Amino acid sequence: MNQRWTTRRSLGTAILVGGALLAASLVRVGDSDASQGKALVRGNVPGEWRFWAGDAWGTRYSALDQINARNFDSLKVAWSWNSGAFGADEYYRTTPLYANGRLFTVATTRRVTTALDPETGETLWMWRLDEGIRWQKAPRQFAGRGLAYWTDGKEERVIVVTPGYHMASLDAKTGIPDPKFGKNGVVDLMEGLGYAMVPLAVDDSGPLIISDAAPARKARPGETWNEKTKTGADGTIGIDPGEGQIAASSPAQMVGDVIVVGNSSIHGYYPIRLKNIHGFVRGYDVRTGKPLWKFNLIPQPGEFGAETWKNGTKLGTPGVGKVDAWAPYAADPDLGLVYVPVGMPLMDEYGGHRPGANLYGNSLVAIDSRTGKRQWHFQFVHHDIWDYDTPIAPNVLDVTVDGQKRKVVAQATKQGWMYVLDRVTGAPIWPIVETPVGASEVPGEQAWPTQPVPSKPAPFSQQGLLASDLIDYTPAIKDSALKIAQKCRMGPYYIPGQPADGGKSGLTCSWYNPGASGGVNIDGGVAVDPETGMVYVGSQTGLSTITLQKDPCSEFDFSSPHDSCGLLGALPTPAGYQPRKDLQGEGFSARAGRSLLGDVSIAKPKEYGGITAYDLNTGDKKWWAPNGGMIPVTSKDPLFAGVALPPQGARGQAQIITTKSLMIYGTGRNGGVPGQPPQLFAVDKATGKQVGAVRIPAKTTAMPMTFMHKGKQYIVFASGAGSSTALTALALR
């Protein structure tokens, strides 16, 4: 394990990164306009952006107003930093930090940590950890999203969690690892989890990793590899991949002097092996890297919530794993609480191997940052079989409800609801009702009989599919849409997936709305105006289906249609086995075709998805706006002849921040109106009216951020994929 860094000042030896030798003189960076001596606001110095979501509360808010409705259209590109020059990425999900005159970011699948001059975009220093095979085996390599920052007014540190699950503390001025932190500035986060540490080889029979630019089961150029024995090692140790994969896909959260870090694991789309590493949240001392506490997201025997896993929870139990807290967190530094959004158990759409409610899956957990003790939790989905994990940071804010000041935390979810809770006690602000839902027809599955449904706010995504939701422009269209809808199981929400061979109803699919991507997901999310109590949700809505089949090469009884046979780690292919051709194309990313009639969705277009504004003082919806505009809808099907079809809102999840007077957003990589050039939009927060738009070099791929440096306000956003990733800064001339 080697560390690499460069600065523009000599560090005693010249170090190469990416084959380029950087010059040796430090460029002076001016201090930010906000001095260190000013009081913190929600853990942030005014004018800076010290947390992934702007402040500890996760508001995505800045009080800056130099850029406003009068001049937004006059924004120009101040600089662009080509992160792709340092390596490729699947797409660039990073939101930078700005603190004390420097901009900090990560880049590439290796999460190269970099400090930039905020005025010019010039690279000041760069650091990365060479993790060898550990990096090669890491899931979710590209999803670092950003960094954490800490200062006591004298020392400054940048905290990075690497793809191979190490945590490093770097001097914010130089990029040099802090020698007092861990071992030479690095803590191995795989240690202390209860799993044996073993030498890693390139080739193994561990579980299948898919998507997220995860490595294939073969050597990469430059790695040690024996072509004859199909083995290789470079001295790297870690958790045996046969136990599952572990990584981190979001930055750590600072709460005072405590670093709070979670984990992410293998995706649950098409898993093969029942074994998977459990989820954990841990606290570390920021000065020393000393572990302070560990919180088990799958309660171990004797811990609170263990009884919600009917087959037991002991570490290593087959079928009991994942439940990782992979999304960013939020905190209330005054209360000392960190709010952890938790993912779902393995696997995404089937849970026959894990009967019970499955705490703390699909929950928001409030943890005391000093002790690691649970203060409260709220579970949004019991026994999840829809991939409705909690995918974004919650939002902390103060509101006035019925004349009383309330400290609340709001969590938007994939299923299209926002749950608003008292952040001290976890009690609902408005009633949340356990509501009966449909039973599963999949053999062995025990769907939970009720799910918690908020009375307020109203949903921001279409849910389920009922006859009243279908297009009815003419009687013939209505009848045709109903015939399509009735081919799959219908219902209001939380419709369990159907077995491919038909259940009691004989139906081989069920409607999936929202689908696994939300509602909200990591590409979208919620921005807050903490001064008014308004929140703005960037979400999407879409109709697809769930079908479950038996995969003979998987240890799971049922999974989404997918042929695992022949893949490394799969069970032996049964003699004479032939995959069902009728199920091909029914997998995770390609199952929306059933919902179309003449290329028109059978669901009526409604004000869902896009941007939805709520007043959390009342719980009322205030306005809705599409993500970048409305799209005309046409059809060549004779059934729609002479019918003027209403337009639909543009797809994708808006990536939102708020300032003193504006809501600012990019459409996201898949959003906006087809054919429209990439733009950044400004919206009046009170009305939803667009008040400005500026063309940008490429679509945003992550949440933007803003800061003030030397009297000038900047907006910075990430864009691009592969070797074309970049950070772009906008400012007024």
Image: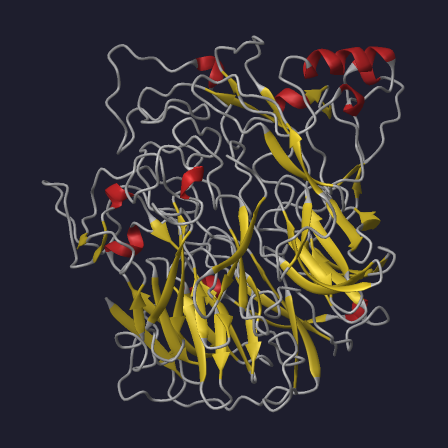
Residue 595 locus on image (x, y percent) = 67, 22
Q: Which residue occupies the foreground of this view, 229 or 288?
A: 288
- Figure coloring: secondary structure
Position of 639 compared to 212: left or right? right
Quadrant containing the C terminus is bottom right
Q: Is residue 440 above or below residue 142?
A: above
Q: Quadrant of the N terminus?
A: bottom left
Q: Quadrant of residue 382?
A: top right
Residue 601 versus residue 419 in the image, above or below: above
**Rendered image quadrant of residue 600:** top right
* Rendered residue at 78%/76% (across/down): 65
Determine whether, in the image, residue 662 is placed left or right of residue 439.
right
Q: Nearer the viewer, residue 36 or 144?
A: 36
Residue sitting at x 41%, y 37%: 309
Among all residues in the image, which is located at the extreme front?
302
Residue 596 location (% of width, % of height): 69, 22
Q: Is residue 21 visible?
A: no
How many callouts does the rendering have? Answer: 0
- The answer to whether one can see residue 593 in this image is yes
Q: Position of residue 107 (x, y in %)?
A: 45, 63
Residue 261 position in % (x across, y down): 43, 62
Looking at the picture, does residue 444 appear above or below residue 198? above
